[in-house]
């Protein structure tokens, strides 16, 4: 009889133990949404990024400054993705190019949030460069011909860019 009592006790313990519910299973934790990003150029993170609106004050007493910026894409070079224009609240959009033409942006990222790291520069864009950029952006011949004066601006040379693609769900 003792031989049958031990297996019965073990079986009962296993049955009762398996009936209790765990409040938070590992599967539930694994299904938490994560942000999907695509990285171009150097690998960077969003940590420590400033808004583009802070760049003018950062450059108030110097011609260039290292920075990490978070903003939205307004326009991308449609020829090959060699520059993008980004939103700067209350100011003209800022042109971002990529260090040593080492990488390019996808042409379909308009409206997406980006974080980029590199060097912000006070700059004057020549008439020739403005016309070239306008041509790359697909502007009309009339719009290109209307560009007649150099333009002071802030530009940015990025060594790395992170494009937020939205939420990714673990399966």
Image: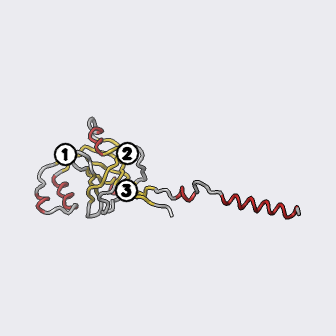
Count residues near mark 3 (Cα–Cα under 10 Å), then give few for <14, some for 14-19, many for 20+: many
The numbered disc on residue 49 is 2
Label 2: element kind = loop
Q: Earlier in the sequence, mark 1 or mark 2?
A: 2
Label 1: element kind = strand
Count residues near mark 1 (Cα–Cα under 10 Å), then give few for <14, some for 14-19, many for 20+: few
Q: Position of residue 54 (x, y in %)?
A: 30, 41
Q: Is residue 169 left or right of residue 64?
A: right
The numbered disc on residue 152 is 1
For the point 37% across and 45% down, the residue is 49
Q: CA distance from mark 1 to mark 3?
A: 27 Å
Q: Residue furthest right?
A: 1
Say which of marks 1 and 3 sits in front: 3
Query: Mark 3 highlights which residue?
Result: 163
For the point 37% across and 53% down, the residue is 161
Q: Is residue 24 left or right of residue 101?
A: right
Q: Earlier in the sequence, mark 1 or mark 3?
A: 1
Residue 58 falls in image quadrant: top left
Q: Residue furthest top?
A: 61
Q: Position of residue 28 (x, y in %)?
A: 54, 57
Label 3: element kind = strand
């Amino acid at each position: 009889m003792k031989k049958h009592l031990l297996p019965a006790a073990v079986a009962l313990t296993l049955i009762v133990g398996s009936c209790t519910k765990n409040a938070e299973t590992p599967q539930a934790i694994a299904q938490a949404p994560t942000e999907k990003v695509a990285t171009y150029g150097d690998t960077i993170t969003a940590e420590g990024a400033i808004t583009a609106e802070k760049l003018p004050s950062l450059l108030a007493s110097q011609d260039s400054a290292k920075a990490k910026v978070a903003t939205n894409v307004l326009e991308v070079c449609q020829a090959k993705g060699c520059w993008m224009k980004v939103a700067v609240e209350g100011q003209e959009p800022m042109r971002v190019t990529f260090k040593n033409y080492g990488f390019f942006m996808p042409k379909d990222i308009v409206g997406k949030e980006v974080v980029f790291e590199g060097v912000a520069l006070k700059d004057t864009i020549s008439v020739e460069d403005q016309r070239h950029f306008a041509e790359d952006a697909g502007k009309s011949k009339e719009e290109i011909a209307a560009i007649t004066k150099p333009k002071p601006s802030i530009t940015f040379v990025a060594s790395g860019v992170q494009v937020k693609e939205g939420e990714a769900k673990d399966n």
